[in-house]
Image: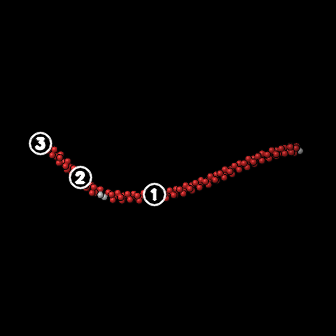
Amino acid sequence: MAANRESVMGYLIGEIWIWLLITFVVGVIIGWLVWGRSAPRNTLTDLERKLTNALERCQVCESEKAELAAAVDAAEATKTDSEKQLNEAAGATARLEARIDDLEAELASAKVASSTSAGPDTVSSSRN
């Protein structure tokens, strides 16, 4: 009886494996027919679409690059003009400071001259 059970079990396991193998082969064939044959056309279409999208993005990036380059050039021109104005203002400031120093020196010498010339006259006129 034990031998009979073992032979029945072996028969059932063999039957299951055979059906599993047949199902696997049928599934692979059906999958290849459905997905495998149409995949190259879909892949080619997808690749063409991706290439078109990439080219469009590249053109957009190129135009943005040109706009940014123009903005950089304009900013550099503005910077150069600003630096020129700053240098001119610094030169004008230096000239004005030198003029202020000259005027302060003239004022100081005028005060000294007026105090020395007005000093004795003021004393004699105040006595009169």
SS under mark 3: helix
Q: Amino acid at mark 1?
A: Cys
Residue that appears at 57% across and 56% down: 74
Which quarter of the picture shows residue 113?
A: top right
Residue that appears at 20% across and 47% down: 17
Say whether residue 14 is left or right of residue 53. left
SS under mark 1: helix
Q: Is residue 120 visible?
A: yes
Residue tagged 2: 25
Say whether residue 128 is left or right of residue 25. right
The one of 119 and 47 positioned closer to us in this rendering: 47
Residue that appears at 38% across and 59% down: 48
Residue tagged 3: 4
Q: Amino acid at mark 2?
A: Val
Q: Amino acid at mark 3?
A: Asn
Q: CA distance from mark 1 to mark 3?
A: 75 Å
Residue tagged 1: 58
Q: CA distance from mark 2 to mark 3?
A: 32 Å
Contact between labelled residues 3 and 2, with CB atoms less than 8 Å apart: no
